């Protein structure tokens, strides 16, 4: 599998102390990579560093292009959909407007957008029911579905997902993970997934990284990480 | 009764202008959380540009359109050059920049055009339409143009992808960047619209109040009042507030006398704001500072 995204010696900060202290990782073309780590390890910062939402230093290549100096909008326009921590919903806009914004970079493509709307409604029928409803009134689970769908509307090559399971009931989490797999296989979207739910994330991913205080402490094929004794103890609870 | 009706029409005419300016204030406020204190002076300066164009022989409507276009780009440039650098600065810094802009525009206009008042032509006939005695052609024309501007802005924000992107950028800049919106340009565009709307308002009010560098001071008081009355975060509220101010001003003026009309109108607004601090139709309770 060739690398779609590749970071080397990536440092990041918010203007103060270094949060990422030289991290290297790859996401394979068509693959799913997961990043695990305790609270405050720097997982969210890692995703932000990729799309220019914090200060960064190091090398990041996406689809053969250097992106470490690109502005957020420009990284997005290359086909990177970031489903952020906290979901980033446009609370005062309707569900449909949120989705249309996801396709903003190709807003002249009316038929393509109509087609994609139906496609995400196929994944998440709930959103179709809520189409004209103000997004701020959606439940947490629905807003997570909306955030993923908004990302899909970009027709991305790569999706960055920040704890999509956060605060959701187990059944909904399973649903969302099932759909992430479908997105990966059917829509051929590569995925970089940050998760606290190590069990599910390691099931889904082919490659995994374990982070502690801004550094990668363990990496390898997901299967191998899953059977690592320290990971089992700290993250899987058995 | 006839006199009252006449006042109502006159009120709707100036109210349309207040409503347009109030909308311009709300647009910038929603995008940046700042009140553009220089809005009125920008409109005044635009009106002088129109006056200059007409003065060198450009036909009225050509001058009208050219002024709108020039004002659009000038306002967008002001955002990029003057406002952008203080985007993240403390509120007082930003307010100082606005006040500075106000003073600069005012004194440059005075320097170029002097402080003597000038008459400004109306594009509408001087006889009242259909020989009626309630409303002049200019008033009716100003009302029509204000309504046209308001409806056009409404459709722009509701129907077009760019309008949607501007609303998104105002609500959530971080998420907007994540869908590829160039938030900085959206702000400049918002300023451009505010400048263009101000230009139209200035050209519509100038035939009534005459043209001088201080012509917008009183007008902006009513526009601010209208925006606060309706709700500074709600475009609809601000527009209705602007119209209300116009009618209130004229009716109160007719009933009590013109010396007290501003006072009475402002007292009424203070009462409303004491009862409803966010305005009649405002919704945000917290203010981001
Ligand atoms: N906007 C910010 N400004 C300053 N410091 C920040 C900011 N965001 C995060 N940090 C700091 O960066 C460190 C890493 O935070 P980050 O959000 O990346 O961790 P995380 O691994 O995503 O944690 P969690 O699992 O709780 O989401 C923390 O110490 C945090 O305090
Ligand atoms: Mg996080």
Image (cartoon, rainbow, N blue to C red):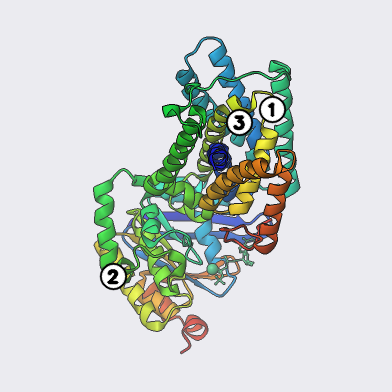
Q: Chain of mark 2?
A: A
Comparing B54 with B67, the one in front is B54
Q: Is residue A153 left or right of residue B112?
A: left
- Above or below residue B123? Residue A154 is below
Residue on which disc 1 sits: B105
Q: Chain of mark 3?
A: B
Is residue B72 in view? yes
Residue on which disc 3 sits: B43
Give the percent coordinates (x, y) of residue B129.
44, 28
Task: Report crowding for label 2: few under 14, some 14 to 19, many 20 or more residues within 10 A (C-alpha).
Answer: some
Task: Report crowding for label 1: few under 14, some 14 to 19, many 20 or more residues within 10 A (C-alpha).
Answer: many
Q: Is residue A111 left or right of residue A154?
A: left
Element type where label 2 sits in the image:
helix
**Residues at discs 2 and 3 both on one chain:** no
Residue on which disc 2 sits: A125
Quick check: marks 3 and 1 in contact, CB under 8 Å?
A: no
Give the percent coordinates (x, y) of residue B254.
65, 40
Quick check: marks 1 and 2 in contact, CB under 8 Å?
A: no
**Residues at discs 3 and 1 both on one chain:** yes
- Above or below residue B63? Residue B279 is below
Element type where label 3 sits in the image:
helix
Which callout, 1 or 2, points to the residue nearer the camera? 1
Element type where label 1 sits in the image:
helix
Which callout, 2 or 3, points to the residue nearer the camera? 3
| Residue at 53 percent of width and 35 percent of height | B197
Task: Report crowding for label 3: few under 14, some 14 to 19, many 20 or more residues within 10 A (C-alpha).
Answer: many
Position of the C terminus of chain B, as image quadrant, is bottom right
- Image quarter where ligand 2 lies: bottom right
Spatial CA span between label 3 and label 1: 10 Å
């Amino acid at each position: 599998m060739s690398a779609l995204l590749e970071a080397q010696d990536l440092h990041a900060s918010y203007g103060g102390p270094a949060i990422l202290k030289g991290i290297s990782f790859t996401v394979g073309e068509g693959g799913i990579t997961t990043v695990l780590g305790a609270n405050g390890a720097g997982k969210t910062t890692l995703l932000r560093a990729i799309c220019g939402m914090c200060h960064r230093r190091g090398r990041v290549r996406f689809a053969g292009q250097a992106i470490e100096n690109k502005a957020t909008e420009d990284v997005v326009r290359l086909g990177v959909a970031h489903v952020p921590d906290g979901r980033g919903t446009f609370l005062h806009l309707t569900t449909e407007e949120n989705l249309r914004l996801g396709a903003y970079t190709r807003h002249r493509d009316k038929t393509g957008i109509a087609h994609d709307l139906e496609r995400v409604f196929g994944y998440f029928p709930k959103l179709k029911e809520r189409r004209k409803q103000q997004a701020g009134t959606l439940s947490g689970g629905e807003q997570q579905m909306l955030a993923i769908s908004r990302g899909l509307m970009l027709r991305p090559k790569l999706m960055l997902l920040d704890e999509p399971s956060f605060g959701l009931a187990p059944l909904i989490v399973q649903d969302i993970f099932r759909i992430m797999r479908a997105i990966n296989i059917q829509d051929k979207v590569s995925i970089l997934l940050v998760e606290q739910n190590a069990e599910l994330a390691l099931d889904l991913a082919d490659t995994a990284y374990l982070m502690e205080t801004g550094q990668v402490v363990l990496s390898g094929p997901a299967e191998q990480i899953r059977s690592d004794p320290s990971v089992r103890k700290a993250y899987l609870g058995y | 009764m006839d006199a009252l009706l006449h006042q109502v029409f006159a009120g709707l005419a100036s109210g349309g202008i207040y409503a347009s300016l109030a909308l311009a204030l709300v647009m910038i406020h929603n995008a940046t959380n700042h009140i553009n204190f220089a809005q009125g002076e920008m409109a005044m300066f635009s009106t002088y540009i129109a006056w200059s164009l007409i003065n060198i022989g450009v036909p009225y409507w050509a001058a009208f359109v050219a002024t709108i276009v020039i004002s659009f780009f000038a306002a967008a440039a002001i955002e990029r050059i003057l406002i952008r650098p203080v985007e993240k600065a403390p509120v007082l810094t930003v307010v100082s920049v606005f006040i500075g802009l106000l003073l600069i525009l005012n004194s440059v206009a005075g320097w170029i055009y002097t402080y003597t008042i000038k008459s400004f032509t109306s594009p509408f006939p001087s006889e009242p339409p259909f020989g009626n005695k309630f409303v002049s052609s200019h008033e009716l024309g100003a009302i029509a143009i204000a309504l046209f501007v308001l409806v056009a802005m409404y459709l722009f924000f509701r129907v077009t992808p760019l309008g949607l992107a501007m609303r998104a950028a105002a609500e959530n800049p971080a998420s907007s960047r994540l869908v590829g919106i160039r938030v900085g340009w959206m702000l400049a565009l918002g300023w451009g619209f505010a400048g263009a709307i101000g230009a139209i308002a200035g050209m519509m009010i100038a035939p009534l109040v005459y043209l001088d560098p201080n012509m917008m001071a009183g007008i902006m008081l009513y526009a601010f009042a209208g925006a606060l009355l309706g709700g500074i975060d709600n475009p609809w509220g601000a527009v209705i507030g602007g119209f209300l101010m116009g009618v209130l001003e004229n009716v109160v003026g007719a009933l009590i006398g013109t010396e007290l009309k501003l006072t009475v109108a402002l007292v009424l607004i203070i009462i409303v704001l004491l009862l409803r601090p966010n305005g009649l139709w405002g919704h945000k309770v917290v203010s981001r500072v």
